[in-house]
Image (spheres, rainbow, N blue to C red):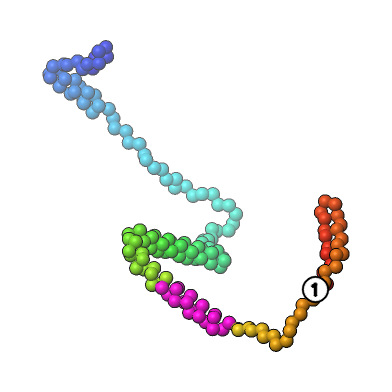
Amino acid sequence: MDPLNGTQSRMPESEAAAEARRLLDEWAARPVRHHPTSFRDATEPPAFGTTPPVPQPDHRIVPAWAAGIAVASIGVGTGVTGIGCGAWLMLQGLASVSLAGVLMVTLPFAGLAMAATAIGGAISKARAAITKNVYEAPVTHHTEIHNNTTTRGAFFARTRNEIR
């Protein structure tokens, strides 16, 4: 490649073949070096103390409260997911219903509510006590108003009238 103008300089086929052969021979003459990819140290580690190593099995015990919380959280998560899926399905169904469908579903409930209200009103009227006051003598009512008025206070005044 020509560095001045960025174009590739062309060499004849015979020169290119000779250059390629020279590069291949040069690479083939180099010794192959094998590098290790891992290393294992076979020497024994030094012993500390006189006690031989003892196997230590892993027995982890989970407290009952932790297991209970884990099970409860899984149950709550599953339940909430189920409720959410049910609500989603219900809302998808309601979204696809027309006004006529909604009326067909709700009118029976409205009719039942009207009938229950009418029956309740009839029972209420039937149970209501009838009170009649019958007077068989002349009735007099005496009210005497004495003009005895007292007012106290300046800003918040209080007036008392005596009625007998």
Quarter location, residue 12: top left
Q: As shown in the figure, which amino acid type bears the numbered disc 1?
A: Thr
Does residue 8 appear to the left or right of 158 in the view shown? left
In the displayed structure, 68 sits above or below 154; it is: below
What kind of element bears circle 1? loop
Residue 94: give x, y in percent of width and height: 36, 61
Q: Which residues are magenta?
A: 111-128
20 or 73, which is in the foreground?
A: 73
Residue 85 seen anywhere in this rendered image of the structure: no
Residue drawn at 86 percent across, 62 percent down: 149
Q: Quadrant of the N terminus?
A: top left
Q: Which residue has dot 1 on it?
A: 143
Residue drawn at 32 percent across, 60 percent down: 98
116 or 5, which is in the foreground?
A: 116
Question: Few, some or many C-alpha atoms within 10 Å of disc 1 (few <14, some 14-19, many ≥20)?
Answer: few
In the displayed structure, 4 sits above or below 79; it is: above
